[in-house]
Amino acid sequence: LHSAVTRIQVQRPGFNYTFAHICILNNDKTCIVDDIVHVLEELKAARSSNRTNFAITYPITHLKDGREVYNGHQLGGVTVHSKDRVKSAEAIQLTYYLQAINSLNDMVAEKWESIFCDTVELFQKSNRKVKMYPFTSSSLKEDFQKTSRVSERYLITSLVLVVTLAILCCSMQDCVRSKPWLGLLGLLTVTLATLTAAGIINLTGGKYNSTFLGIPFVMLGHGLYGTFEMLSSWRKTREDQHVKERTAAVFADSMLSFSLTTAMYLVTFGIGASPFTNIEAARIFCCNSCIAIFFNYLYVLSFYGSSLVFTGYIENNYQHSIFCRKVPKPEVLQEKPAWYRFLLTAKFSEDTADSEETNTYESHLLVWFLKRYYCDWITNTYVKPFVVLFYLVYISFALMGYLQVSEGSDLSNIVATATRTIEYTTAQQKYFSNYSPVIGFYIYESIEYWNTSVQEDVLEYTKGFVRISWFESYLNYLRKLNISTGLPKKNFTDMLRNSFLKTPQFAHFSEDIIFSKKYNNEVDVVASRMFLVAKTMETKREELYDLLETLRKLSLTSKVKFIVFNPSFVYMDRYASSVGAPLQNSCISALFLLFFSAFLVADSLINVWLTLTVASVEFGVIGFMTLWKVELDCISVLCLIYGINYTIDNCAPLLSTFVLGKEFTRTKWVKNALEIHGVAILQSYLCYIVGLIPLAAVPSNLTRTLFRCLFLIALVTFFHCFAILPVILTFLPPSKKKRKEKKNPENREEIECVEMVDMDSTRVVDQITTV
């Protein structure tokens, strides 16, 4: 396999590039290859010459030239005899290092990586007993974008389901008052806003990434609720009003809350799109979401508002809601076939003129269900204790999950499942989790290496690690020569330069030491490096992060000034410090906005209740997503930012209606709030959940995280809107007792009582008129 890889050729006009042309070179101008390759070459030579005394030790072995090399990250699944001699190994990891010094070299290296993967897969077909998992510098990027391709048909299925349910949610048996077109046009409004944002991002040179898959669902939750709320407000208007008056009433009733929630979205996602967010994918996602939400607001005001007016005129003219055909009078319909009468069923104004209390929209299934059954059931005295108990169980499990929250730094969580990244990381975790990556230990100042106390300090700092160290090798070298390690400075340095580093088995250490000549020709070691490897368990990421923090704290307090580094530290350190930054900033901005708006709303108690509800929902979502094996990574953090806004979207109208209600009991106002806003919340929730379901089937870890987080947000918010808040508000502030107002002497009540007796003197009717 190694020979096949080194023979790979990249054809360019006039020249064929091989590995030797683009590899990183040693000091002796040969390609850097893994030490395990040299071990295998020596093993092969020993077998061909029938030598049986060749042994490989683990995790440090010796080559033929006497060099000590570390093979813990190159041999995996190792079984050892006594004295660390390798009996067998289940896996071998080979790494090839390419240089990218200019654009041509970079292009050739990229093409070489592509051919490398094809070569390994071809080699796999001819050697089926051996499993091979290639991984290159571009694999993660390709597998990250693969999520978009594999999710296309699932998103189309989701769109079809949402369209169908949105139309059904706006439909009713009455063919005049049914609004199926508004369900479709509401979804079209959301789609137009999303496409507009995507177009602007493309025109401004933005880069697409797979996290954008979450934006349609962000828009679905916000946009559809706004349109359903407008439709719900339309149902509350009087049919004898003109369309303009009804439309004005709809905008006055619903657009204030929709404007405030839109502002909340723009603030929270705007903070996420600001320079305060260090994760580029999160910043681009939040920027795109802000643009989409802004245009959705404009389209709801203009496009959807116009559509509502249009369907209003259709209703006023008693035209069919789908076919726009004039609906005939009941006496005409009686002469038509049954199917015709079924399609054109409608109530005319004169049919309901006898009863002022009749609401023609109550035939809508969801309106009927909430008003007739659910509102009475949830406020029942015997139901409330069970809801409170259920909430305590919810808090208990959420707390259990919250205490186990872990920050996700596993790259496989953001790619499609059947990809090279997943296969490679799974194999690496399985076979190469015994030791940490090689950690560079860099001493960046001149210290007294010849001083025995300093030697003890350096060895103490690196104690417990598997060490590949010039310093320790040099001290052992001196001891073998029966020379004291506490030599004078000049003797210590001269022996190091002229004897130790000239020995072939230690010559490679010359790359680990930087010498400097002073003005008096005295040579000094100004900087040096060693390599450390830690023994790890299965929780490799957590241990490595703890190790990084421990070494960092030690570097700040130690006498010897050093730093530690591994390429994986860059990702871990940046990720640990910034994964929660978007959520933290958005939470702070949301709380600030809620606090500031408390001085603008009619009752500041609305904001108090809203803040508590958001905290309860976010706490529950974080806890349950941890129990559902979702880590706190970039995707889940973006979902949690959205969760703040989704909760405010659904709960704010309910709470404001309840808090501002006067004169009646708490229970009565809870019922009123559910009857007024419950239908819109329920319609939006049903469409949202149906749209999410196909996402669960996408073969990608990114969409799996997206589905689980968004599903939990929708479920927990729905639970609060329809169970927790309706029950808790019935026995907690604000009080609804009618305040006794002092009567002004000038405001007198004149009561005229007229007694009317019928001719037969069988009953007395009292007519009381208050002026």
Image (spheres, helix red, strand yellow):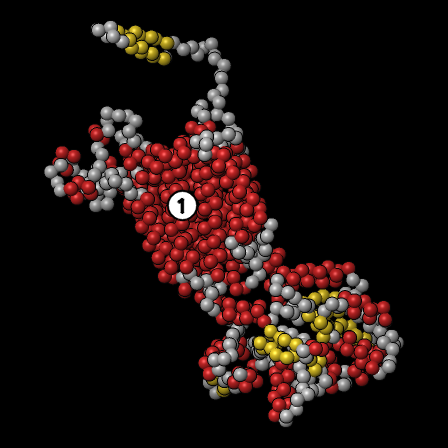
Between 309 and 440, the one lying in front of the other is 440
Amino acid type at image mark 1: Tyr
Residue at 63%, 60% (x, y): give it.
542
Name above or below for residue 630 compared with residue 46: above
The mark total stands at: 1
- When asked about the image quadrant of residue 36, the answer is bottom right
Between 127 and 558, the one lying in front of the other is 127
Name above or below for residue 735 compared with residue 618: above
Residue 418 appearing in the image: yes
- Name the residue carrying label 1: 685
- Left or right? Give the position of 170 relative to 447: left
Q: Residue furthest front?
A: 82
Q: In the image, residue 429 lies at what x, y percent?
A: 57, 68
Q: In the image, residue 292 lies at what x, y percent?
A: 43, 51
Could you classify mark 1 by the number of other residues whose Cα lies within 10 Å: few (under 14), some (14-19), or many (20 or more)? many
- When asked about the image quadrant of residue 31, the answer is bottom right
Residue at 68%, 62% (x, y): give it.
547
Name above or below for residue 115 compared with residue 335: below
**Helix or strand or loop: what does disc 1 sit on?**
helix
